[in-house]
Every structure is written in C-alpha cells, then in structure tokens.
Amino acid sequence: MSHNAHLGDLLLGKAVRRPVLRGVALIKRHLQGSEVWFIVLAGGVGLIAGIMAALLGHFAHLLQSMLYGFSPDLRLSALPTIEPWHLLALPLGGAALGLVRFIFPRRTRAPIDVVEANALYGGRIPLRDSLIVSFQTFLSNGFGASVGLEAAYAQLGGGIASKIGQWLDLKRQSLRTLVGAGAGSAIGAAFGAPLAGSFYAFELVLGGYTPAALAPVAAASLMAVLAAQLMNIEPFVIASTAGQSIEISGYLLYAVLGAICAGVGIAIIRLVASVEAIVRKMPIGEIWRPMIGGLFLIPVAWAAPQALSSGHGAMHLYMAQQALVTTLLLVFALKLVASVISLAFGFRGGLFFASLFLGSLLGSIFAQIVNHIYPAADLDILNASLVGMAALAVAVVGGPMTMSLMVLEVTHDFALTAAVVTAALCSSAIIRERFGYSFSTWRLHLRGEAIRNARDIGWVKALTATSLMRRNHTTMGESEGIAALRDKVPLGSTSRVLLVDDQGDYRGIVPTAEAYIDHVSLDAPLKELARQTEVYVRPDMDISAIMRVFEHFGVDDLAVVDEDHKLLGLLTEKYVNRRYVEELERSQREFFGEM
C-alpha cells in the first residue's frame, strides 16, 4: 500500500469516527439532562437484565436436569429420591468452582456487590466482578448446592447497568439509580413480580424511595418481566391459591409469627457467619473448600433432596400438602444445614430463596402448633406458610415491602397481603432494633465495612483525614523553650503549636495561651506543656470516625499522624463539622432532588 493510500485511509477513518463520536456525545447529553430519556435508558437496561436473568435460570435448571437425570419439567428439590451416584455432582461442582477460582484468582479485595457498590462507590461495579460472581453462582446452583441464583441475577443486572452508566458518564445519583433498576429488574424477571422487583431496588439496592427514581426503576422492572414472559421462562414463584379469610385474631397471631421469624433470621445469619469462621480456620485451601463441602452435602441430599438447590420445587410441594410437624421440622433442619454448608465452604449464592422456603415451612409449623393448642384460632396452613415465607425473608434479606408485594403478586389476595405486611413489619422492626443488619450487610460488616443499608455513604469514606487536614500548621521541637515559642508565635497568631522530636515524630499539642501565662518558666521545654500526646488520628480515617474521636476526647484539635508516628497535619473540630454538614446536605439534595 502506498503512502498516499495509507494517508487516505486514515483520513477516511477519522471522517467516519467524528460523526460517531458526536452522536455518542449527543446521546450522553440527552441522557444526563432529560428525565424522559433516562427512563428509556432504564427500560432498555431492564430488558437486557430480564433476558439475561431468564437465560441464567433456564441454563442452570437444564444443567441440574442433566446431572441428576430428571425431566426438565420437574424441579431438583421436588424429587422424592435421588440415585446416590447422581449426588457425586455435588463434589464435582465444588471442584469446578475451585478450578474457576484457580484460573481467576481473587485479588486483594472481595468482589463488589450491588449493595456495596451503591453504598460506597456511587454505583461503580467492575464488570469482571459481576461476571465472575454470576458464573460462580451459576455453577454452584447448577451442580445442586443449596444456594439460590438471586445473587447472580442482582449482580448481573446491576453490573450491566453500572457498565452502561459509566460509559455514558452518568452523574453519581443517576448511576446509583440505574444500578438499582438493573438489579431490581433482574429479580422481578426471575420471580415474575414487577412490583417486588421495583421495591427490591428501592429497599435493598438504593436504600430509599425518591420521586426521581420511581419511574426509571418501574420501567426497568416492567420491561424485564415482559422479556422473561416473551421468552416463556417460568418464574421462580408461580401463582398460589390463597386460603381462607383472616380474622382479627389471625393478624395478632401473624404478628407473633413475624417476631418468631425475626429471631430465627438472626440465628440463621449468625450461624452462617460462625460456621464460615470455623471453616476458614481449617487447614483447607480456598480452592478445595467447595469440593469438601460438596462431599458433606451428599448425606444431607440423600436423606432429603428438598435440601438441594434453591428449594423452589420443595416449597410448592409442601405448600400443596399438609405434612406433619415432625416432617416439616426435619426438612427445615436439613435445608438449613445444607445452606450453611454450601455457603461456609465457598459455594456462591445467597439465602434469598432459601429464606422463602424455610419461612414457608416455619409458617406451616406455627399454624399447626397454634391450631393444636388453641383450636378456635383455626389458622389456615397455606396462609401461614405464605406469611412465614415473607416474614423470614424480611428477617434474612430485608425489604418488608418487597416481600409483601411479592406475596400480593403471587396470590392476588389483598386480605392475605395485609397479614403479610403485619408480620413483615414486626420482623423488620425487631431486626433493626436487635440486630441491625441483613445477611448481605452483615457479611460486609464482618469485613469491616460500616454498611447497614444501601444508602450512599461513599462520600463519608472519601472524606478522610488526609483530604481534610491542614498542612500550614505551626510546628516546633519539643525540646525548645517557652521563650522560643513566644519569639516565634505572637499571642493571637494561632491557638496551638504542634510538637515534634528530632526525628519528626509527633509529641503533642501546646495551647499558645498557656505559654504566655506569667508564672511559666521561660527556660522550661515545651514538652512540659504538651497535651494529647497519645490522642491523634490516622490519615485513612474517614470523617465519621474522626468526629467520634473529637466527641470522645472532648478536644478542639487533632493531629494527623501516620503509622511511623510522623506528623502529617492538623484537624480542627469546627472545620470537620462544617464539611460534614456541607457534604450531608449535598448528598440529600442529590438523593431527593431531580436527576
């Protein structure tokens, strides 16, 4: 190719790229400045999320049917028995999961999920995290481990939304809303419940409701459910027939059931965390843990196939028949054991659907016991199963309105939904009072993150001592005399002097006024007046932690000192408080204002 021809191709390429880039820039401006176009974007994200969630669930079910040898129109957890050799799929699945972790080793940090991303990182999720977590969850569920696919749905939907939003340079609040819409729409598609999907986004991913987020989230969830229906994908929760009408006494009893579910939910969350801690202390490498966990699952699955997978088939099986309390208790225990083993030994997934299944069992047990003790109550077992399903899910996952609306969309029974709301709110109130975390935020808490919900606290993390401190402070040596301070620092020029030793290590703060007291010896070294020699903050501490230090010690100034005890800067309480109020007001304006 001649030089002129090559130059012509380059010019042609630039000529083609320019209008494309201008078109992309125009689209970005429309999306950033128009609420209508943002709703359209959210609908498109919901469409993609719904398709991917439907395909993910479909292929996981096909993998189960091939591995366990049952018809695709059945469910793994609804099988009465499983041939023992089929159960070898469990350790094989663990080995496959270990191989994935070997090929894609985890970096220094854990993968970022949608709740963490919206709470700390303004909705930014690395696409690699979303793909790996979703694939690991697919393998875990597809090979039959006692975990659900809901974590993969939310991660995939939120991850796709985050990637699109970052490419379009969306503002922080718009990006968080889009991530919530993507995650919620994927959940809505999986359960065939657009309202539940929308409120999943509001309660669990966004951390609140706003007028600006309502239309985009609803549009995404509706488009996702529509996409799943057009693909003829059966949702996880299919329509159930509601039981008899509920009397006033029934609402009071269901409130008691909600309280019981709260206690059981706390116990489940703590049990999973405790067993995980024990497993981590075992001399088993992270790559080998899922395979060992699969071996432990074999006897549980052989005793009760209902303990496998998410439990969708088993839940409908026990809702359709009134099993004995002893049978329900046994299945409850085995399902709980299987879920704890699966999560503790490294299978990917969540407790969303497991909590629904366990709650339905708990509700049925509760109704039978109450009817036996107090026959006049005459609680309907199906109604109690649905109420328990929602109440325990609220205790473990969170989202009282999410679970309540899911029951409404399943049963189309408003009277039952009122009972569900009663139990869900009781469960939620007790959880907030006595525990304060959902399953996902509890695991983040164990990693050291101060997250109780998805409300945006990323700005708190960004305001560290390094970004807030002053560097133009007055510094003197601790061995210098008071007379030297008077010569160097006139009274009224500054309220404090920071002391360091010969190596630059921090040695305290001297109030300037104290050096001008009449009876003070001018020859005395400054270290005799030093205060707060052991009271300081580290440069990586965020503003909330800094404010707690100010409050605890009752001081006006704090030195910023690194790990080598070198003095870096100075913080004043007045400035820190002012910056906190400014950022809080800005965050609230973004959250409640128009996008």
Image (spheres, grey):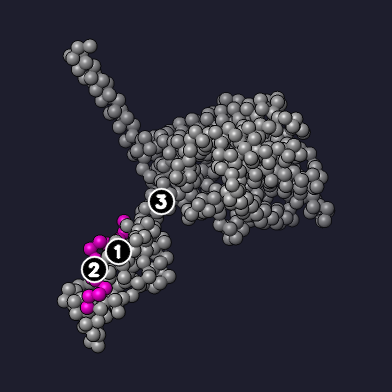
Q: Amino acid at mark 3?
A: Gly
316 relative position to 169: left or right: right
The structure residue drawn at horizontal position 63% and vertical position 26%, both measured from the top left corner, is 62
Q: Is residue 301 visible?
A: yes
Q: Which residue is mark 2?
A: 475
Q: Are marks 2 and 1 in contact (CB under 8 Å)?
A: yes
Q: CA distance from mark 3 to mark 2?
A: 33 Å
Which quarter of the picture shows residue 266? Answer: bottom right
Q: Residues within 10 Å of mark 2 (few under 14, many from 20)?
A: some
Query: On the rendered image, what quadrant is the N terminus found in?
Result: top left
Q: Does the magenta segment cover residue 108?
A: no
Of pointers 3 and 1, the one earlier in the residue sequence: 3
Q: Secondary structure at mark 1?
A: strand
The structure residue drawn at horizontal position 79% and vertical position 52%, both measured from the top left corner, is 369
Q: Which of the pair 458/509 is nearer the observer? A: 509
Q: Which residue is mark 3?
A: 458
Q: Which residue is mark 1?
A: 567
State whether residue 305 is above or below residue 386: above
Q: Main secondary structure of the magenta part?
A: loop
- Pinpoint residue 151: horizontal percent, then vertical percent: 55, 40
The structure residue drawn at horizontal position 53% and vertical position 29%, both measured from the top left corner, is 51
Of pointers 3 and 2, the one earlier in the residue sequence: 3
Q: For the magenta stretch, what is the residue range?
A: 467-481
- Pinpoint residue 491: horizontal percent, then vertical percent: 20, 77
Residue reaching furthest to the top: 1
